[in-house]
Image (tube, grey):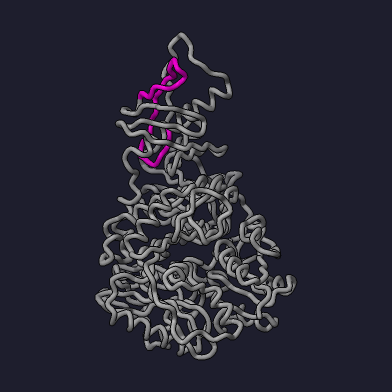
Amino acid sequence: MISTVLVANRGEIACRVFRTCRELGIATVAVYSDADADALHVREADAAVRLPGAAPSETYLRGDLIVAAALAAGADAVHPGYGFLSENAGFARAVTEAGLRWIGPPPEAVEAMASKTRAKELLGIAPLDPAAVTAAELPVLVKAAAGGGGRGMRIVRELSELEGELKAASAEAESAFGDGEVFVEPYVEDGRHVEVQILADAHGTVWALGTRDCSLQRRHQKVIEEAPAPGLPAALVEELYGASVAAAKAVGYVGAGTVEFLVADGRAHFLEMNTRLQVEHPVTEAVHGVDLVALQLAVAEGRALPPEPPAARGHAVEARLYAEDPAAGWAPQTGRLHAFAVPGGGGVRTDPGPASVPGVRVDTGYASGDTVPVHYDAMLAKVVAHAPTRAEAVRKLAGVLERAVIHGPATNRDLLVASLRHEEFRDEGRLDTGFYDRNLDALTRPGEGGAAYAAVAAALAEACRNAGRFGGGWRNVRSRDETRTYEDGTADGTEVRYRPTRDGGFEVLAPEGVRAVSAAPDRVRLDVAGVVRDFAVAAYGDGTVHVGRHRLTPRPRFTDPRERTLPGSLLAPMPGTVVRLADGLAVGDRVEAGQPLLWLEAMKMEHRVTAPASGTLTALHAAPGRQVEVGALLAVVQTEDVPAEDVPTAKAPAEDVPTEGVPTEAQEDPTA
C-alpha cells in the first residue's frame, strides 16, 4: 500500500490531494519554487523539497528534479495533480523507472490521448488541411495538439489571417507545452461544452461517472461548471457515455480522466481526452458522493472498482475565483491577500471567516497574508455548492461568493455572482460558449448605488481614523466641508462630501439621501432612504480600502504633474515577460490603431498590446525576454495631433524595465 505521496504540483490542487491523503493516513510531500517558499501547499505538507528558481521551466516542469525530490523525501508514490507535467508520458515513465508508483494512467495511454490529433485519429476523426481550407469552411479553430486551457488556440474568421494565426499558435504551444504542433478543425459557434468523467481500474472496469457542463468560458478557459449537464436528452447522454468508455478502452486507460465534447444542434462533436484529474472534479464528487482522489489512490494500489458507479444525487455548481480584472481584458492581478475567507466547508480554509454554509466546499491554495505571485495561474479558489436542485445550488453559490471576504488584488467575484444570477444562465436551455461574448459588457458594468454608499463609509471611517491619530473634536467655528473621491469602477469615481457635527458625528452632503447613523475606524452605519445598512471597512498600506465586497482606491487630492501619462504611451497592464514583438517592429515605423505591437506573458496567459492610435512609433522599450513591472513604459506612438515636444524620444529603458532577463516558460494551463 502507498505510504507517502509527493504531489508534483502547487496551489489548491496540491492542498486538495493532501487533504485526502491525511484522511487515509498517508504522509505527504510538497515541492516548491522560490516564489512559493511560504505557500499554503508547503505549509500543509508533512515535508517539502525546494526546486530552485521561480519560472515553471526551472521548477514545476523539471521532471528530473521532482523525481529526485520524491526519492530524497522517502515518498513511494507521485500524484501529478493537473497542469504542468500531469499529461507528460516521459515524466510518468521517469517516475515508474525510479521505483515509484505513478498515480495516473499508463504512459502509453497518456501518449495516445495527449496529442489531440492522435486522439482524433483513434476515433476516426481527421483534422482539416490548413492549405486547403476555403472561405466556405470558416470559421475554423487553430488548436495546439498538446496541452489545453486555451493556450495555442485561435479562432480564424478570415482566410488572410490563417497563416499568421498558425505561426502564433505554434509559438505559444511550444512555449507552454514544449510541443509546437497545431492543427485546424471546424469551429462550432456557440455550442455547449460537455464532458464525461471516467474512472477505470486495471481489471477492465470503466465508469462513466456522469456529465458536466463547462460552457461558461473566457478565452477558452472554464469559469463556471456544473454537474450533471442540464437539459440533455437521455439518448444523447447515453451516446456520450458510450463514446467515452470506448475511448478509454481503446487505449487501455487506468485511473481518472475526462472526455470532452462540443454539443450543438443535438449532436456531440469529440474534442479531446484529458488524461488527468480536472479542476472541476469536485462537482462530480458532490453529486455522486465519491472522493476521486481516494479512488485514484485505490486504483494505483491495484484495487478493483465496483461494477457500477454510484448514482447521481442533486446538482452541484462550481465557480473559479480568480485574481483578475474581467473588465480589463481579464488581466491577471498580483499582490498580497490581506484577508481571504469564503463561507464554506470541506476544503482547505485557515481563516475562521464567515460562518460555514452546509453543502458548500472551498478548495484553495491561499490564506490571509499570502501573496499571489506573477509566475503561475491566478486562481485563488474553487467554490462549489451542492443542493437538491440546480436552482437551489446556483442561488447558494451566488450568495456564498457575495459574502466572501477578499481583501487584496482585484478579482472576478462580482462577475461570478452576476453570471450566476443572469437570466441566460438560470435558463438551462440557453447555455453555450458564447455567453461572455454576448454579456461581458453588461456583467462588468458597475452597479448603481452600492459602490457610492461604500465610498461614503470609507470616507467617514478615514475621518474617524484621522481624528484618533491627530486629536479631534468639534470646534465652535464651522469647519469647511471635507471632500474625498474614490475610484470604484465607475467612469468618474464617487465624490463624497461631509462635515463634522456638534455631537461628534458627521453630516453627509454628497451623495444625497445618505445619513450617517454611526461611524468608527472599521465600521460605519448608514441610513439610505430609511433603510439602515452596516458597512465593515478595512484600509491597507497599499492604498486600497475594502468596504464589504467593494474594493476602492482613494484618488489623490492633488495630482503630481510629473506623473501624468504622456500622449501615446503604452504602459504594461500587469507585471510579466515580453514574449515577442510584431515582425520587424522598429522605432520610426508607421502603425495603425489597434495594430498588435507586442505580447506579454503573465500568469500563464498571453496578452496582446496594441497601438492606441494611428501614428509613428517613437520609442520602443520592450524586447523579447525582458521582465516588466505593471505601469512600465513599453512603447510610445506619436499621433499627428500631438506636438513632438510632448512625446518622449527613444532612449534607454527605464530602471523598472530591466535589460537582463530570460523568457519565462508559461505554465501548462491547469484550468482546462
Q: Residue at x 40, y 27 (%)?
A: 517
- Compared with 547, 9 (above or below) is below
Q: Residue at x 63, y 75 (%)?
A: 78
| Location of residue 242 by image quarter | bottom left
Q: Which residues are magenta?
A: 486-509
Is residue 439 visible in the rendered image? The answer is: yes
- Compared with 173, 249 (above or below) is below
How far across and down, in percent of the image, does residue 404 sit?
A: 46, 49
Comparing 366 with 445, the one in front is 366
| Location of residue 160 by image quarter | bottom left
- Compared with 554, 237 (above or below) is below
493 drawn magenta? yes
How far across and down, in percent of the image, does residue 328 sit?
A: 41, 50
Is residue 672 visible in the rendered image? The answer is: no
Which residue is farthest top?
Answer: 476
| Location of residue 506 by image quarter | top left
Q: How many marks?
A: 0
Image quarter hosting the N terminus: bottom right
590 drawn magenta? no
Comparing 6 with 273, the one in front is 6
How far across and down, in percent of the image, does residue 56 sit?
A: 60, 64
How far across and down, in percent of the image, does residue 453 sit?
A: 38, 34
Comparing 376 with 518, the one in front is 518
Q: Residue at x 35, y 66 (%)?
A: 215
Q: Residue at x 57, y 61 (%)?
A: 11
